Image (cartoon, rainbow, N blue to C red):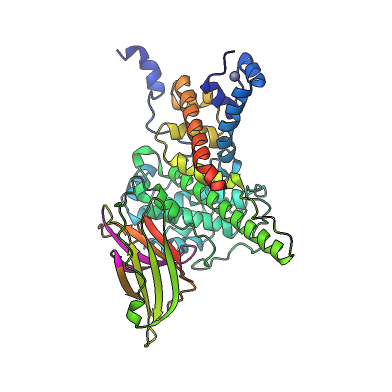
Amino acid sequence: MRHCTPEDLGLAALGEPLPADEAAHLAGCARCGDEVAALRRGVEALAVPELAAPGPPVAPPPGLWAGIAAATGVGVAPRAHVVAASAPPAGVPDSPPLPVGAGPVPPPADPPLAPVVPLRPRRSRVLLAAAAALVAGLAIGAGAVALRGGDDAGGSGVPVAAATLDPLAESDASGRAEVVERADGTLVLEVDLAAGAPAEGYYEAWLLTESVSGLIPLGVVRTGSEQFELPAGLDLGEYPVVDVSIEQLDGDPTHSGVSVARGQLA
Amino acid sequence: MTDLLGPRTSQRPRTVGWVTTEATPAAPDASGPDDAEVGRRFAAGDEQALAWAYERWAAQVHGMAVRAFGPGPDAEDVTQQTFVSAWTGRSGFRPEQGPLPAWLVGVARHKIADTWARRDRQRRAAEAAAAEAQRLPAVGPAPVDSAVADRVLLLGELDRLGQPQRGIIELAFFADLTHTQIAERTGLPLGTVKSHIRRTLERLRDRLEVDGAALHA
Ligand SMILES: [Zn+2]
């Protein structure tokens, strides 16, 4: 029995009709049918309407840019009337949203946001990890240096929060962060980082909101232990995520998007 | 020796540097450079290019987000995170590989898939809490929605594809074109399109078999 060609099995997985004799064989052949089923799983995962090429444009609400500006530090702004003119004024598609693949989760009950600046922090922990994943060839020096251990800032303060820094993406970096309150009320973040030297650039520590609508740069981190005095009045509940990124010596003060370790203060 | 093919090649490129489903031209805007120049400046880190990109393509990205989640916070998160990640991850954008709006749409797909995954985690946490509250007999953790996890995994795999493989499979998946239509659109021979489709589908299958199993365990 002559089986279908691999090319035809691929087309069948995409749902394309095959020539009659190929289709007849496929209908009666378990081996070819299994192969189509295996190939179809990827098709079914990705070829869904929600991921399809853009349909009707919808102008984003006016407040949305503020969060992007806050997260990126970009100082220029799009012209609001140009953004508003880029989609029909109704701003809402005719059809209701498609059912999503995430099971019976009702749509968020809260109404669309008013143009609040910045957007209130929300849930996403994904943050910049996807951006980091987009950066091809991210290479981190192999061979982690042993973690120095979590000495409590020399006993010079009261621990108020701590986080384990877990490696992200292909990173081997890890560590621990601890916030202590000094006698004078200032907060100090101590970062213990175990990581190989970056192939290029340097490590920098950040505090992030959960939705990455805000980032606070703390400074350069070397392997070992570093302390950073936190800005007065900083609300750690609002910036609970400690992030370590690789930054290039390019004079760009914004986050590179290449994060190597991250943890949530608790 | 190319004379024989001259008339055809003049109509269609024989090779494609990139193929895309989403190169929607921007609305005419006398005050800014053309889209390709915006892309080059974006890649070079020119902040003005981010503002131009937002002016031209935020409505397309937000349209996708609203189509997936309806208007509201989830859609707004997707749009916001798409532009933040695109900017902070701009070193991953290669202007010679495709236009900036197509790349932004690719980033938006990741954000949509990530949001599904987050909702799925919340659903399982809520179900576990509900079972706990009702003192139901322990039935183990609620199952992960495998399609949700597969999407995150496979979108990452698409990012690893070179051109023209990536453009071809995107036309098949996201523009719903047949292999014949893809060949017409790109000028690539039918056999080439078919073999790229096969190889990409096999690659996605392998990725699911290797990593998907662990993910769902
Ligand atoms: Zn067969």
Q: Which quadrant of the view contains residue A16?
A: top right
Residue at horizontal 49 percent and vertical 64 percent from the top: A210
Vertical comparison of A67 with A47: above or below: below
- Of residues A154 and A228, the one nearer the viewer is A154
Vertical comparison of A235 with B128: above or below: below
Residue A153 visible at all: yes
Residue A215 visible at all: no
What is the total number of numbered labels drawn onto the structure image?
Answer: 0
Spot the residue most to the bottom. A184
In the image, taking residue A175 as reference, residue B179 lies left or right, namely right
**Majority secondary structure of magenta residues:** strand
Q: Which residues are magenta?
A: A200-224
Residue at horizontal 64 percent and vertical 60 percent from the top: A108
Can you give x and y, in whole percent of width and height, for residue A112 in the image?
61, 62
In the image, taking residue A145 as reference, residue B207 lies left or right, namely right
- Of residues B69 and B58, the one nearer the viewer is B69
Vertical comparison of B122 with A239: above or below: above
Q: Quadrant of ligand 1?
A: top right
Residue at horizontal 26 percent and vertical 60 percent from the top: A251
Can you give x and y, in whole percent of width and height, for residue B31 in the image?
38, 51
Can you give x and y, in whole percent of width and height, for residue A12 in the image?
59, 25
Vertical comparison of B90 with B165: above or below: below
Q: Quadrant of the N terminus of chain A?
A: top right
Query: Is residue A220 highlighted in magenta?
Result: yes
Q: Which quadrant of the view contains residue A262?
A: bottom left
Can you give x and y, in whole percent of width and height, for residue A102 in the image?
63, 50
Q: Which quadrant of the view contains residue B151?
A: top right
Query: Is residue B122 highlighted in magenta?
Result: no
